[in-house]
Image (cartoon, grey):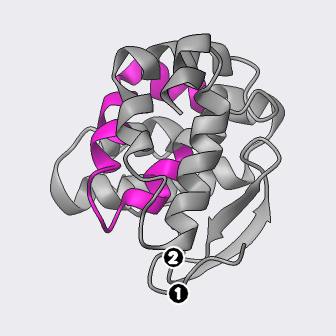
Amino acid sequence: FPPAAEETAGSSSAQGMGGLERVESTTEATPRGAAEAADEDDPVEAIVRALLLDGASREAALGELAVLMDCAEGDRASAVGAAVRASGGLGPLVELIHVPAARVDALRTIGNLTADTVDRRAPETKRLLHELGAFESILAYIYAEHEYTVVCALGALQNLCSRPKDALLL
């Protein structure tokens, strides 16, 4: 589905999220974006650290992380997933599902982080997200008003639905 303008303004699509279409933001993720004051040698760590902040910095970091995951494959995607897991960044991702302006980026990022085809360590991410109640949080958006929110929520749930008890929730 093409993203709805009001949901993903400034976005274009690419393949991903476990075979579903994923959205790439066309918002420029400059090296001095949300993680401006952080270590320039490791932009992933800088973005993840900024994700742990509050307010606009956190949402900007999520936008950068979403773009990064849209483009990452193989070892790079696994490294991003490892950095998010190690830093405690999954908790803020789950929280950002409930922030309307950040919802689509949060859902598509979770979808990409939990796609076995994107990150070979996705099962570990899934386990941690289940512990954080992400499945139930995402489930609330499968009937959202905006079509692309539904697509991203269903893509993330598809990837998280690895246990029989999750399938029963659907």
Residue 1: x and y, percent?
Answer: 72, 72
Q: Residue at x 37, y 46 (%)?
A: 140
Q: Is residue 133 magenta?
A: no
Magenta extent: 80-109
| Mark seen at residue 135 | none
Query: How many residues crowd around disc 2 within 10 Å: few (fewer than 14), some, or many (20 or more)?
Result: many
Relative to 73, is 4 above or below? Answer: below
| Mark seen at residue 5 | 1
Task: Judge whether residue 125 can be spotted in this image.
Answer: yes
Q: Is residue 107 magenta?
A: yes
Res 60 quadrant in image: bottom left
Q: Residue at x 50, y 63 (%)?
A: 149
Near-viewer residue (79 or 16): 16
> Outermost residue toward the bottom?
5
**Residue type at numbered disc 2:** Thr
Relative to 64, is 81 above or below? Answer: above
Q: Which residue is mark 2?
A: 8
Q: Is residue 90 left or right of residue 112?
A: left
Residue 118: x and y, percent?
Answer: 76, 35
Residue 153: x and y, percent?
Answer: 53, 50
Query: How many residues crowd around disc 1 within 10 Å: few (fewer than 14), some, or many (20 or more)?
Result: few
Do the residues bearing badges 2 and 1 touch, measured as CB atoms within 8 Å?
Answer: yes
Q: Residue at x 35, y 38 (%)?
A: 137
Q: Is residue 23 left or right of residue 62?
A: right
Tell me the chief SS of the magenta region.
helix
**Residue type at numbered disc 1:** Ala
Relative to 22, is 125 above or below? Answer: above
Query: How far apart are the alpha carbons under marks 2 and 1?
Result: 5 Å
Q: How many marks?
A: 2
Residue 115: x and y, percent?
Answer: 71, 33
Quick one: SS at disc 1?
loop
Near-viewer residue (95 or 39): 95
